[in-house]
Image: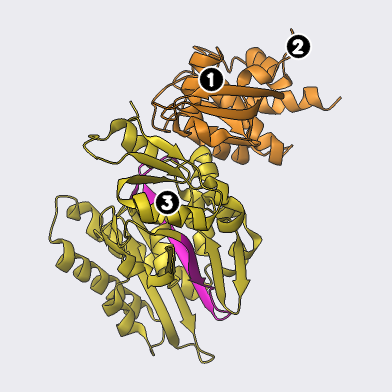
Amino acid sequence: MIPELEYFSPKSIKETCEFLKENGSKTFILAGGTDLLVDLRFGDNKSDKKFILNLMNLKSDLGQIEYNDGILKIGSLVTHTELSESPIILEKALILAKSALVLGSTQLRNIGTIGGNVVNASPAGDNLPSLVALGTKVIVTNLDSERKIDLEDFVLGPNIVDLKHDEFVTGFEVEAIKKNARGSFIKIGRRKSLAIARLNMAVVLEKDEDGYIKDVRICPGAILPVTKRIRKAEDIMIGEKPTAELIDKAASVVADEVIKITGIRSSSEYKIPVLESLTKRALNEVILGGSE
Amino acid sequence: MKKHQVNFTLNGEPCTVEIAPNRTLLSVLREDLNLTGSKCGCGVGECGACTVLMNGMAVNSCLILAPQIENSNIVTIEGLSSEKILDPLQSAFMETGAVQCGYCTAGMIMSIKGLLNKTPDPSDEQIRETISGNLCRCTGYEQIVEAVHKSLKYSAV
C-alpha cells in the first residue's frame, strides 16, 4: 500500500526548487517511478516524509539531449528508451545507448529516467559504468545555484548520493567518445531481459597515431558498493602498445583492486574470474574495433 | 486525504477521475473505471500483465502514480476493439492459440501494439525483444510471435 502523501506537481524548475527549499527533507521526488513506487509499496514505510513531488511536467526543460564541443548535455528526465534511440547518443556515446538498452524491460525503459537511475544509485545500476567511463558530471540545482560534481564522487554508497534536501539533479555532462577512441559495454545477467546485472563492464580506450594507448577508462559495475574506475589498471596501460600480455595484466589488476575493496565474498568464486574475463573481452573489443 | 482531479484521454475519449494521489493507474483502471482487462501480476513492473499504452508507449500501469497521467493519452486492451469488431491482433491471438490462461494476454497485446506504433513490420527478434518485459507461463511465446505476423496479413488489405 503506497502511503498517503500530499502530491505536488510543479510547472517549472524554479517552482520545484522553491518547494524543495521549504519541504525538501519531507519530500519524495518522483520521475519515472520505476524504483520509487516499488520502494513506497514494499518498503518499511518508517519514513516521516509527507510529500511526493512529480517532476514530469518539467520534461520539456529536462528531457533534452544536446551536443556541443565534445560534451553531451543530457537532461535528467531523458528516458532509457530515448537514450538508446537518440541519434546523437548512438553517434557520440554508443556505450551509453547500449547500457540503456539492456536495462529493465521495454516498459521500464519507456518511463524510467537517467536521473532516477543515477539518484537511486544501485551498485548494479546498468547506466553507471558507462556514465563513469565517459567522465560524467552530475548537474545539481537548487534555488540559488547550480553545482557540478563528478559522478564517481556523487554516489557515496549503495543507494546513497550527495544530494541535499533543497536540491535535485537536473542533468548530466557526458564526454563524447573521441574520434580515435572506442568503447565497449557488456552486461552479464541471469536473463537477457528484466535482469539485475550480475556484472557489468564499460571500457573506453583511445590510441594515438602510432597505436600506443593514450587514454583508457575501465569501469566494472555490480561488483563494488560504489561504481568506480579501476585507475591502477588504467595506469599500467597508458603509453603502452596494446598486447595480449598487457590486457591480461590489466585484467588481473582489476581483479586485485576489486578484492582489496570488497574482500573475498561468497560470490567471489564466480565473480572474480568472470570479472577478469569480461575485462579482457571489453579491452580486446576496443583494441580491435569496438563501438565508436 | 485530499483527492486530485485528473483529466486525461482514455481509449480515445476524454476522461476525468477524482482520486487520492497514492493510487496507481492500474488500480484506477480496474477499480474506478471498471476496465479489468489489465491485470495485476506482480505489482513491481516485472511481469508486464498490467501493460497499457501511455502516449503510444507501453508502460507498466502498476508503476504509474495515477495523478501523473494528467493530459496523457491512455489506451487499454478495451480500447482496441469497437462494438463486436476485434483488433486484427486480438483475432490472430485467438486463432494461433496464443491465449491459454489469458492472464498475460492483455499486457502482451498492448506491448506489441506499442511496437507496431513505431515498427509496423517487425522482425521476430524485434517482437521477442519487445515482449521480453511480458511473462507468459503457458505458451512458450511461439504462438504469440506467430500471431503478430498473422495479424499483419489481416491489416494489409
SS class, disc 3: helix
SS class, disc 1: helix
Q: Chain of mark 2?
A: B
Label 1 is placed on what type of residue?
Leu
State which chain is coloured yellow. Answer: A
Kindly identify which residue carries mark 1. B29
Indicate the quadrant containing the C terminus of chain B: top left, top right, bottom left or bottom right: top right
Kindly identify which residue carries mark 2. B85
User: Looking at the image, is B68 positioned above or below residue A184?
Assistant: above
Q: Position of residue B57 (x, y in %)?
A: 61, 37
Q: Residue B11: tell me if it is visible.
A: no
Please determine if labels 1 and 2 lie on a single subunit: yes
Kindly identify which residue carries mark 3. A19
State which chain is coloured orange. Answer: B
- Over which residues does the magenta segment extend? A170-197
Label 3 is placed on what type of residue?
Phe
| Residue visible at 47% across and 33% down in the picture | B65
Q: Is residue B68 left or right of residue B146?
A: left
Q: Position of residue B155 (x, y in %)?
A: 80, 25
View extreme (top): residue: B84
Q: Is residue A53 left or right of residue B55?
A: left
Label 2 is placed on what type of residue?
Ile
Residue A157, image quadrant: bottom left
